[in-house]
Amino acid sequence: MGDRTLTNEAYSRYPLVENRAQAAIMAYVHAEARPVSKAQLTGSLNVSRGKISTEVARLIEAGLLADEGFAVSEGGRRSSLLGIPFSAGLIAAIDVGATSIDVALTTLGSKLVAHRGEPADVRDGPRPVLDRVKALLGELLEEQASLPQDVLAIGIGVPGPVEQASGRLTVPPLMPSWDRFPIRDAFAGEYAAPVFVDNDVNIMALGEHWGGVAKGIDDIIFVKVGTGIGSGIIIGGRLHRGAQGCAGDFGHICVDSVGPLCTCGNTGCLEAVAAAPAIVLATETCTREGQSASLMAVLQEKGELSMKDVGEAAKHGDYCALTIIRKSGRMIGETLASAVNVLNPSMIVIGGGVSRVGHTLLAEIRSAVYQRSLPLATRNLPIVLSELENDAGLVGASVMAADGVLAHDGN
Ligand SMILES: [Zn+2]
């Protein structure tokens, strides 16, 4: 695998851009996600036409930009379109979930080119999980021998609070054995590329904002409902991480002070009453009380229910499944209403495994938010499902890594 990764010599390519103007040009082209003209760059960036021409020429020489055809003629002149070429190098995008890992290769322009995933238990600890991540990444690079082999940056999302300064998880409820583990260093032996780490919901929000249903919308709350509940907040087009990096930790808002114990040690958190494990447990109880013949058959056969079983039952109109999913949606919606009053977003996106149970959850979240938020805040507030679904995290991990490696560090 050694020949497929960056050599120390190649590492001298960093920083990839030479100055702030180049960083601004690359950020613009990356954000557009389609070829742009020099006129667009001049019109959108606070940089003179001459400077744009000079820096674009240098970026083409460095292999970070390439001509990609011509724009429709403007006043008789054809202007060439610029894009991030396939040959610029690769980003490794990694999405570690509570119960799965997904690894992808993308272009520097964050287009997915290869993807592999498998079930995993994050509680096994950082070493075995990251060893599997690295094995999958190695296999993808091995398989894609025709691709440029430079991994320019690694972006990784993990299901817990990440301290931004160090890139380390800090007292993560779902994965206690990862506390303070140096994730960035885990790749240092094999990949001489910078590693960017963030919370999984933050990267999903980035992905959805870059290339999903929230593209072009600058104020959004992305809510993930899965094994846990979290949110990623984008304000003014930028991810809002807060002072330490844990902004949007929505699942640990208290909704019932005498409620069940949460993985975080507190009682009655939203996550403890409305995330997948709580939904499954409540549905099992309802089933055992004799309210669902169809789920009783599944329960007797397997000894337990899964979120998938509950989702399937809900789609077929099962009383237990529907009642409990509605209750979960209502609690999520009521909590979200407070966030809407505080942040006044222009869109709410719901993603994560539980969001795929059908329309019931979304309908209930919508009705609770519209009922509980200020009328002005909900006047034009679409509440929609994630468009990228499973890919949101991978796309967002790539966007985070590309943004990071294309930024100019000021030196
Ligand atoms: Zn909690």
Image (tube, rainbow, N blue to C red):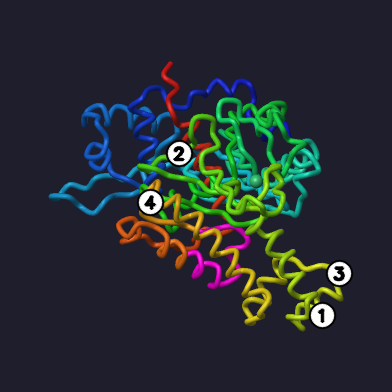
Q: Amino acid at mark 2?
A: His
Residue holding disc 4 = 345
Count the marks: how many? 4
Q: Is residue 289 magenta?
A: no
User: How many angstroms separate mark 3 from mark 4 (CA)?
Assistant: 43 Å
Q: Are the residues tagged 3 and 1 within 8 Å (C-beta)?
A: no
Given residues 142 and 406, the one toward you in this image is 406
Q: Residues within 10 Å of mark 2 (few under 14, many from 20)?
A: some
Residue holding disc 1 = 297
- Whichever of labels 2 and 4 marks the residue nearer the N terminus, that label is 2
Q: Is residue 115 visible?
A: no
Q: Determine whether, in the image, residue 189 is placed left or right of residue 9.
A: right
Given residues 112 and 207, the one toward you in this image is 207
Given residues 210 and 331, the one toward you in this image is 331
Q: Residue at x 45, y 32 (%)?
A: 406
Instruction: Kindly tell me whether mark 1's CB lies below 8 Å from ligand 1.
Output: no
Q: Secondary structure at mark 3?
A: loop
Q: Are the residues tagged 2 and 4 within 8 Å (C-beta)?
A: no
Q: Amino acid at mark 1?
A: Ala
Q: Residues within 10 Å of mark 3 (few under 14, many from 20)?
A: few
Magenta part of the chain:
350-365
Q: Amino acid at mark 3?
A: Gly
Residue 263 x %, y %: 71, 46
Residue holding disc 2 = 240
Q: Secondary structure at mark 2?
A: loop
User: How many angstroms separate mark 4 from mark 1 (CA)?
Assistant: 44 Å
Q: Is residue 301 visible?
A: yes
User: How many angstroms separate mark 1 from mark 2 (CA)?
Assistant: 46 Å
Q: Amino acid at mark 4?
A: Pro
